[in-house]
Amino acid sequence: MFHDTCALTGRLMKQILRSPDTVITVAVTPLALFLLFRYVFGGAIGGTGNYTTYLLPGILLITVASGVAYTALRLYDDRTKGINARLATLPIARSAVLWSHVITSVVSTLVTAAVVVGAAFAMGLRPHASPLGWLGFVGVLTLFTLALTWLAVIPGLTARSVEGASAFSYPLIFLPFLSSAFVPTQTMPGPVRWFAEHQPATSVVESMRALIEGEPAGTALWTALAWMLALTALASVVAVRTAARPAVRAGGRAG
């Protein structure tokens, strides 16, 4: 399985390297939002702290949501062009097909996230994280990317159109706006505040913010880990079972 996964991952990475605009396109929207909130709204809602540091985790969540949309599109493309059906006739591990898409998504999304972090330094990011804090910051971001990537595999296997394969990412991109990513939840009205404080994006954002500022992440980190591990487990099980369906293996439309 390891050899098969490496070979298929190499094929997908070559596709991305031949089309670097994918990484650039995924980074454009988060960077535009970063500039908008930092330099247009930041003076009104940023308070007295470093608003660039405050914004970065939420912007990275939007970056991940934008990036995994391409995972669904690549998988949809392979399925509708009969590549998956061709691979099913070869003596390779069946799970290698899905894992190659997942690994490619995680690597390419983290590269795009590195571009966003570089831009954050240019805009005034001044982190106080120790090497261990940076390791935790990257670890949380990687787990979040892994969870959303497995979620993206499902529409990639079941969508009936290109639009359907990418549409699932829109709610994920919008989710950080209903969290503490841009403003403290204390400023929100009752029902919105309750939702913001109990949805996964808030715990992920607050744990990443604490880690990069060199502060204890506390219960936010454990809550974020619980959300991400549960989502990864559930989405991967559904994705693997969906991929095992005959219509999907044959590259046909799934009902």
Image (tube, rainbow, N blue to C red):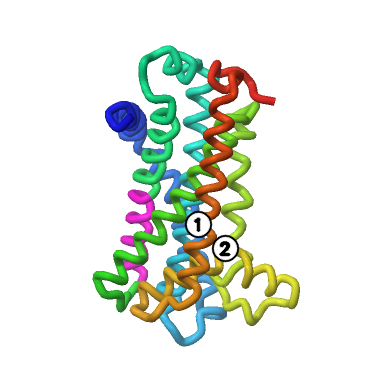
Q: Is the magenta stretch mostly helix, strand or loop?
A: helix
Q: Position of residue 179 (x, y in %)?
A: 59, 68
- Screen quadrant of the C terminus: top right
In the displayed structure, does residue 135 sit left or right of residue 219? Answer: left
Quadrant assignment, res 89: top left
Nearer to us of marks 1 and 2 is 1
Query: Residue drawn at (35%, 38%), measured in percent from left and top?
Result: 20
Query: Residue drawn at (31%, 71%), measured in percent from left and top?
Result: 133
Is residue 118 shown in magenta?
yes
> Is 150 located above or below residue 15 in the figure?
below
> Is 14 located above or below residue 44 in the figure?
above
The single residue placed furthest to the left in the displayed view is 131
Q: Residues within 10 Å of mark 2 (few under 14, many from 20)?
A: many
- In what element is the residue under mark 1? helix
Quadrant assignment, res 177: bottom right
Query: Residue drawn at (55%, 18%), measured in percent from left and top?
Result: 251
In the displayed structure, does residue 76 sit left or right of residue 9? Answer: right
Disc 1 marks a residue whose amino acid type is: Met
Residue 145 in view, yes or no: yes
Please state the extent of the stretch shown in magenta in the rendering.
110-124
* Location of mark 2 (residue): 200
* Location of mark 1 (residue): 228
Between the C-alphas of marks 1 and 2, the distance is: 8 Å
Q: Position of residue 233 (x, y in %)?
A: 52, 48
Camera-side residue of 199 and 241: 241
Marks 1 and 2 in Cβ contact (< 8 Å): yes
